[in-house]
Structure formats: C-alpha cells, structure tokens
Image (cartoon, helix red, strand yellow):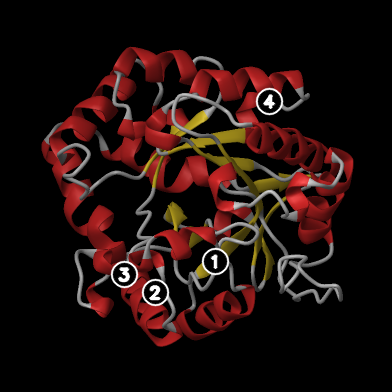
C-alpha cells in the first residue's frame, strides 16, 4: 500500500498534483527564528492567501519542511489547508545541530527513543508542543516525511544522531526522508550513512543541493538512487536562474530527470509579497518553468519534476 500523508489525512499519490517539494508557511519560535527575525512567518491569513494564489497558478501540494522545534505549528497548517484547498504535507525530524542547545532532549535521549518519537508523529499524530511537555498533546495531523540536516562540509554529532534516528523511523513506518544540506555539501556522505543505517537511497531526497551546482557531483549522487531537491530559483544571491537551468539541462541530458524535484523554500518574510517582500510561492510555475521551456527542457522532463517524482518521493510505503 502506498499513500501520501497530508495534514488533513491520507490521499492517493495520483491526487497530489504539481508539488512544491520544500517550502515554509508558518514559523513561530525555534532556533532559526531566534537567529534571524526575517525567518518568522506568523500570519495564517497571509499563508491562506498565498496558498489560494498558488493553487490558482497550478500548484496542487506543498511540503512544509519545518521540523521539531523549528517553529512548526501544525494546527495552523491544518487551518491553511482547510481554507485554501492545498494539499499540505508536514514533516517530523530535525534541523541542523546549531538550532538545538545542549540541554535539548534530542541531545539526551537514546537514538532508539528519538526514533520512536519520530515514528509516533507519523503513525499517531504530530506532537503539538514538539515534545517539550511534560504532557503529550497530539494533533489529528500526522507527519508525511522525515527530515534531518547536515552542516556545511561536515556532519556534527547531534546531526549524526538525528540521521540514525530518522533512518530507524523510516524503516519502522515506511515514510520517506527529505534532508537539508548546507550549501549543497555532504550529499555523498549522507548517501553512505543512510545505506549504513539500512535505508534505500531511493527513499531519500537531498535538499538544497542546487546551491552547489556541480553537474558531475549531481550525477554521482543521482546515480546512487537519491532524488535531488532544487529550490534555488529566484535566489540570485546564490546563483542566477541561468546556472540552475544549465544544471537541470545537464541532468536531463544525462538521463536523470527522474531524480529531480523543484521547490520554493520561501522561509523568509522578505520573500513573500504578502509580507511586502519578493516573488513568493508562484515564481517556479510563473517564471522559472517558462525559462526552462525556452532553454529546451522538455515538458515531459518538467512534468516528472513537478508531478511524477513527488508522487514517488512523498509516498509512505507499507
């Protein structure tokens, strides 16, 4: 049995539609917001407006990738999904180690205990207060994907624990994994670790790897079965869109169009028109996809990135 788990319940993979594989709708509290106020997204009405516009533009689904204790507000995500009609997938797991202090429970519990807490968010319901209790209060919403993260050019001790726990939870539940890489580094190392912990790399998406747009490196990763998450369109501070389009062309020419997903990663208020900022959630469909077509990337390849690959990568497989 395969299904997609959204915050409003499970759906068939074919119901998903065009999918923004990695984005953000609400961030209130958590280490990232404390480090940078621009990362606070606290307006449910703005998110509803953004998702209604996204649905009108052609999006069918979005994965909100705020994990445990990084501003995740699952009850707000349910409200946004109900009001907008957008399929929203919420995640469990963890961000980079720098966002969790030494006293956080992720640094104290045994790996098997952490894995069980992650698995319970998939099988029972997301803990509304991020397990900061002491009382456990679960949402009716269940997580649909497991996240873990790695640092720039290294994997820190807490991150290694989170990777092992996330892999164990994936094996318990059949849930997929979607990662954060810092500037696209440590991808091959993560592939080696998930293999070590028993997870098929085909169940893993490596996020943000287009911030390291080395075509040969990307081909080496894709050859091992993982899917690559490209969420840099509109971010000229990293690379202009032309660089990413050339990367995608190269990957398609090498036969790896089945190993790419696209996402917006609109985690900053300054990126949302609703907050008075930039392009927002429709940039990929309204600006980037037309440029891909103009560059000679086929509709078949683009549809795989937007429709077919997300159906596979977000399926829970029992």
Q: Residues within 10 Å of mark 3 (few under 14, many from 20)?
A: many
Q: Residues within 10 Å of mark 1 (few under 14, many from 20)?
A: many
The answer to whether the residue labelled 4 contacts the one labelled 3, judged by CB atoms less than 8 Å apart, is: no
Residue 39 left/right relative to 163 = left
What is the secondary structure assignment of the residue under circle 4? helix
Q: Earlier in the sequence, mark 4 or mark 3?
A: 4
- Per the rendering, the mark at residue 51 is 2
Task: State which mark lies toward you, 1 or 3.
Answer: 3
Task: State which mark lies toward you, 4 or 3.
Answer: 3
- Per the rendering, the mark at residue 269 is 3
- Per the rendering, the mark at residue 88 is 1
Q: Residue furthest front?
A: 102
The answer to whether the residue labelled 1 contacts the one labelled 4, judged by CB atoms less than 8 Å apart, is: no
288, 138: nearer the viewer: 138
- Per the rendering, the mark at residue 194 is 4
Give the spatial CA distance, label 1 vs label 2.
10 Å
Give the spatial CA distance, label 2 vs label 3.
15 Å
């Amino acid at each position: 049995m395969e299904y997609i788990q959204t915050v409003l319940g499970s759906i068939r993979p074919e119901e998903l539609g065009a999918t923004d594989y990695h984005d953000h709708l609400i961030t209130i509290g958590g280490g990232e917001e404390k480090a940078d106020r621009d990362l606070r997204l606290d307006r449910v009405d703005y998110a509803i407006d953004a998702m209604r516009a996204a649905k009108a533009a052609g999006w069918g689904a979005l994965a909100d990738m705020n994990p445990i204790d990084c501003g995740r507000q699952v009850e707000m995500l349910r409200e946004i999904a109900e009001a907008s009609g957008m399929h929203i997938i919420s995640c469990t797991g963890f961000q980079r180690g720098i966002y969790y202090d030494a006293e956080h429970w992720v640094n104290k519990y045994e790996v098997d205990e952490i894995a069980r807490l992650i698995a319970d968010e998939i099988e029972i319901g997301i803990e509304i207060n991020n397990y900061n209790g002491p009382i456990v209060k679960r949402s009716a919403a269940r997580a649909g994907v497991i996240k873990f993260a790695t640092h720039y050019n290294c994997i820190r001790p807490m991150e290694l624990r989170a990777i092992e726990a996330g892999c164990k939870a994936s094996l318990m539940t059949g849930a997929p994994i979607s990662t954060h890489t810092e500037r696209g580094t440590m991808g091959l190392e993560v592939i080696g670790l998930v293999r070590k912990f028993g997870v098929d790399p085909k169940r893993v998406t490596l996020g943000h790897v287009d911030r390291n747009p080395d075509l040969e490196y990307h081909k080496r990763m894709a050859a091992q079965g993982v899917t690559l998450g490209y969420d840099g369109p509109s971010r000229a501070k990293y690379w202009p869109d032309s660089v990413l389009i050339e990367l995608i062309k190269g990957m398609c020419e090498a036969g790896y169009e089945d190993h790419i997903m696209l996402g917006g990663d609109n985690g900053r208020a300054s990126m949302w028109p609703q907050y008075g900022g930039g392009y927002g959630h429709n940039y990929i469909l309204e600006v980037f996809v037309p440029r891909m077509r103009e560059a000679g990337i086929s509709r078949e390849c683009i549809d795989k990135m937007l429709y077919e690959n997300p159906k596979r990568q977000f399926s829970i497989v029992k």
